[in-house]
Amino acid sequence: MEKKKHLKIGELAKRCNVNRRTVDFYTSMGLVVSTERTDGNYRLYDESTVERIQWIKDMQEQKYSLDEIKEKLLLVDESGTEPFVSQQLDSVIHGVEALEREITTLLPLLNKIQQGANEALKEKLEYLFTHEQTIVQSLAMILERLGS
């Protein structure tokens, strides 16, 4: 029977391209959990922690707070990855549907506004169109990953 490989904190930090203090901090927040301790009382982490820290880093890049990340990780831990992804996609779908309703409501009003639209309205429209592309690209990436 093959024994699972465990990593000391320094090895884990190096593999994840973070420093040891970051791993300590994630551990203290409950984002990652050491699975064992050595006879010398060093914390040990299993290989899945590497992927988990990468996911944390990815979510931080997407501007999620550590509390939001902890909440999402807890959902994954409780229900598994597939139900979590399904739930998150349902949430995105409901959000897109709400946006579609808002746009449908605003379109007739926008049609009434001629070329004299004020600056604030123009900025809001530019923001919406800028982020619409990002949303569409993200959804395309999700669909691509689901197809593979």
Image (cartoon, helix red, strand yellow):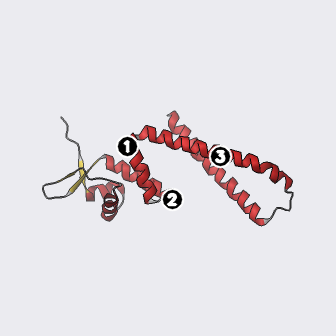
Residue 144 is left or right of residue 97, and the answer is: left
The residue identified by callout 1 is: 78
Q: Are marks 2 and 3 in contact (CB under 8 Å)?
A: no
The residue identified by callout 2 is: 63
Q: Nearer the viewer, mark 2 or mark 1?
A: 1
Nearer to the camera, 11 or 131: 131
Mark 1 surroundings: few (<14), some (14-19) or many (≥20) residues within 10 A: few
Q: Position of residue 28 (x, y in %)?
A: 31, 61
The quadrant of the picture occupied by the N terminus is top left
Residue 49 is left or right of residue 132, and the answer is: left
The residue identified by callout 3 is: 98
Q: Quadrant of residue 40?
A: bottom left
The span from disc 2 to disc 1 (Cα, nearest Å) is: 23 Å
Mark 3 surroundings: few (<14), some (14-19) or many (≥20) residues within 10 A: few
Which residue type does callout 2 highlight?
Answer: Lys
Q: Is residue 101 above or below residue 126?
A: above
Return the disc, 1 or 3, that comes first in the chain's sequence. Answer: 1
Residue 33 is left or right of residue 76, and the answer is: left
Q: Quadrant of residue 144?
A: top right
Disc 1 element: helix
